[in-house]
Image (cartoon, coloured by chain):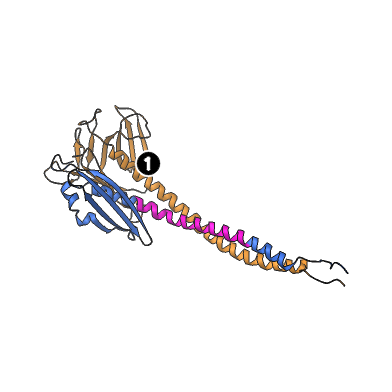
Chain colours: A orange, B blue
């Protein structure tokens, strides 16, 4: 008979089994957190996409210029329109910002495309390189069904928001863009919020 | 009978092994938790950044006279749905002799704050820029 001074393998295995059981319950709980995390990641991915759309529009508008005070000719035009009882404004401006065209100034036309003949749906930007060239259309967000834009100006005596604008020489002081979807909650959160842009060279 | 025959692990050895495993598991869990907290904070920060930029744009639309006495609608408030749990506060400090304004926009939510600070040039009197 030998004296036992340690645990037997059997006892150790039993202890390990208990530890493993507890650990597996723990990891199952962690897996729940993991699901939560991937859901969150999906959420922040779509958030990042919406924010990129906002930033792009803001960047284009902040670099919008008309002919006055600029070496290159430009234009700024806002047409206040309704289509099927929805705001269907069209905003056209020349921008010095970098666009997917990569070639100096570009004219941006921002509008809601509901023409079934074109592949684009919803908020669309049509880019034309200056001076003239083929137009490139970029679908920004398909869930937008209405676009309402107003311009802030000091030109008419006092600060005023105006629904339309046409000038080759002056850009407005600020622009506010409101997007609408089919229903109130149809738009992604960051596109429900108005896009406000201050134009440095605006009047 | 000089040496007892060892047929198993000592309790001490098993305990040390468990402590090592526990330490490793504990620290990796802490790491995981930190990752989770950072991931939970990210959408908050993304939203707060965009909201602060929006409020900054609102400040930059103001005239110099308004910058000196911020309208209530710009100085503080709560964002509309779906950002109703975010509040903002805008503070403008003016240095007397030059037309520079220090603008500070704070966006707060339940357990955090995002601050956007910049300097705006707005010449008084002159053009309406």
The front one of A197 and B127 is B127
Residue sticking out furthest to the left = A157
Label 1 crowd (10 A; few <14 / some 14-19 / many >=20): some
Check disc 1 and report its element: helix, strand or loop.
strand
The front one of A75 and A15 is A15
Q: Which residue is drawn at 67% across and 68% down?
A: A18
Residue A124 on image: x %, y %: 34, 41
Q: Is the magenta stretch mostly helix, strand or loop?
A: helix
Q: In which image quadrant can residue A107 be found?
A: top left
Total marks in image:
1
- Circle 1 residue: A139
Residue numbers of the magenta segment: B22-49
- Marked residue chain, label 1: A
Q: Which residue is drawn at 75% across and 67% down?
A: B10
Residue A19 on image: x %, y %: 66, 66
Q: Which quadrant of the figure contains the N terminus of chain B? A: bottom right
Q: Can residue A88 be seen in this view?
A: no
Q: Which residue is drawn at 30% across and 33% down?
A: A96
Residue sticking out furthest to the front = B2
Residue A36 on image: x %, y %: 50, 59
Q: In which image quadrant can residue A58 be found?
A: top left
Residue B47 on image: x %, y %: 37, 53
- Is B41 within the magenta? yes
The relative height of residue B107 versus residue A20 in the rendered view (above or below) is above
Q: Residue at x 62, y 64 (%)?
A: A23
Q: In which image quadrant can residue A67 be found?
A: top left
- Is A72 within the magenta? no
Q: Which quadrant of the figure contains the C terminus of chain B? A: top left
Q: Is residue B94 left or right of residue A185?
A: left
């Amino acid at each position: 008979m030998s004296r036992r001074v340690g645990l037997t393998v059997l006892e150790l295995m039993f202890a390990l089994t208990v530890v493993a059981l507890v650990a597996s319950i723990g990891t199952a709980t962690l897996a729940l957190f993991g699901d939560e995390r991937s859901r969150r990641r999906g959420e922040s991915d779509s958030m990042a996409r919406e924010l990129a759309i906002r930033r792009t529009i803001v960047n284009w508008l902040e670099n919008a210029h008309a002919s006055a005070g600029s070496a290159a000719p430009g234009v700024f035009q806002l047409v206040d329109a309704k289509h099927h009882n929805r705001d269907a404004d069209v905003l056209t401006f020349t921008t010095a910002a970098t666009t997917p065209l990569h070639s100096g100034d570009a004219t941006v036309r921002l509008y809601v495309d509901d023409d079934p003949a074109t592949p684009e749906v919803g908020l669309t930007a049509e880019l034309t390189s200056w001076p003239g060239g083929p137009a490139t259309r970029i679908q920004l967000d398909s869930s937008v069904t209405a676009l309402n834009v107003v311009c802030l100006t000091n030109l008419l005596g006092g600060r005023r928001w105006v629904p339309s604008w046409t000038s080759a020489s002056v850009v407005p002081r600020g622009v506010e863009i409101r997007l609408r979807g089919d229903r109130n909650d149809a738009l992604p959160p960051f596109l429900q919020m108005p896009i406000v842009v201050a134009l440095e060279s605006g009047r | 009978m000089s040496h007892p025959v060892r047929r198993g692990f000592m309790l001490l050895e098993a305990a040390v092994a468990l402590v090592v495993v526990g330490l490793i598991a504990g620290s990796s869990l802490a790491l995981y938790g930190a990752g989770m907290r950072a991931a939970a904070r990210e959408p908050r920060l993304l939203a707060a950044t965009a909201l602060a930029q929006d409020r900054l744009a609102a400040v930059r639309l103001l005239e110099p006279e308004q910058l000196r006495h911020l309208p209530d609608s710009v100085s503080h408030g709560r964002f509309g749905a779906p950002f109703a749990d975010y509040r903002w506060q805008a503070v403008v400090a003016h240095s007397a002799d030059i037309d520079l304004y220090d603008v500070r926009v704070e966006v707060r939510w339940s357990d955090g704050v995002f601050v956007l600070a910049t300097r705006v040039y707005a010449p008084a009197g002159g053009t309406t820029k």
